[in-house]
Image (cartoon, grey):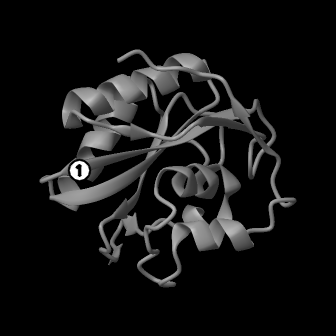
Amino acid sequence: MARIYISIGSNIEAEKHVRLAVAELRRYYGQVRLSSVYESEAVGFSGDNFLNMVAGVDTDDSVQTVSAVLHNIEDRHGRMHDGPRFSARTLDLDLLLYDDLIVSEDRLQIPRDEITKNAFVLWPLAEIDPACRHPLSGQTIGELWEHYDKSSQALWPVDLSFPG
């Protein structure tokens, strides 16, 4: 059984799509640990603010299967993969960590660079598992968040609840 962490983000009908993502992850994986939801400004382009959070699940699926499941969920909810890398999106699901696995393939990078670069990934990940170790640095996620330059990105918690 692998412990995985998935970032969830949206800036098009964001509340709706974040809720749909959580429902889909529960349908696929059962028990899902959820961080708080955070609002952040768009990074890398000018656009509406994003809602972001992190989900943690345990799974027997391979890393490739998890990646395919996440892409399928994105596609079913209107995610367009043919636009610019930094653009508005209905739903963005990124596999951040898969236990302590390190993978660098075509469309699959584990751990994701965004963990150490973006507050909207690191803060919610630190919230749900601060003791988890980053497979490359060896530091805990809590330590990474503690040393993160919090003035570099505007980010604030929002009240968004999930039934069930």
Residue at 66 percent across and 37 percent down: it is: 38
Residue at 21 percent across and 33 percent down: it is: 30
Q: Say whether residue 21 is left or right of residue 145.
A: left
Q: Quadrant of the C terminus?
A: top left
Outermost residue, bottom side: 137
Residue 103 in the image: state x and y as whole percent.
32, 74
Q: Say whether residue 26 is left or right of residue 133.
A: left
Which residue is identified by label 1?
58
Which of the 4 quarters of the picture holds residue 41?
top right
Q: Label 1 neighbourhood size at 10 Å, few (<14), some (14-19), many (20+)?
A: some
Residue 29 in the image: state x and y as whole percent.
21, 37
How many numbered dots are placed on residues in this image? 1
Question: Depth check: 116 or 84 in front?
Answer: 116
Q: Is residue 146 visible?
A: yes
Residue 85 in the image: state x and y as whole percent.
59, 51
Q: Say whether residue 115 is left or right of residue 162.
A: right
Question: Depth check: 134 or 73 in front?
Answer: 134
Outermost residue, right side: 151
Q: Quadrant of the N terminus?
A: bottom left
Above-or-below relation of 28 to 107: above
Above-or-below relation of 70 to 141: above
Three-letter residue code for mark 1? Asp
Q: Is residue 113 visible?
A: no
Residue 95 in the image: state x and y as whole percent.
39, 54
Q: Secondary structure at mark 1?
A: strand
Which of the 4 quarters of the picture holds residue 76?
top left
Q: Say whether residue 12 is left or right of residue 77.
A: right
Residue at 18 percent across and 50 percent down: it is: 59
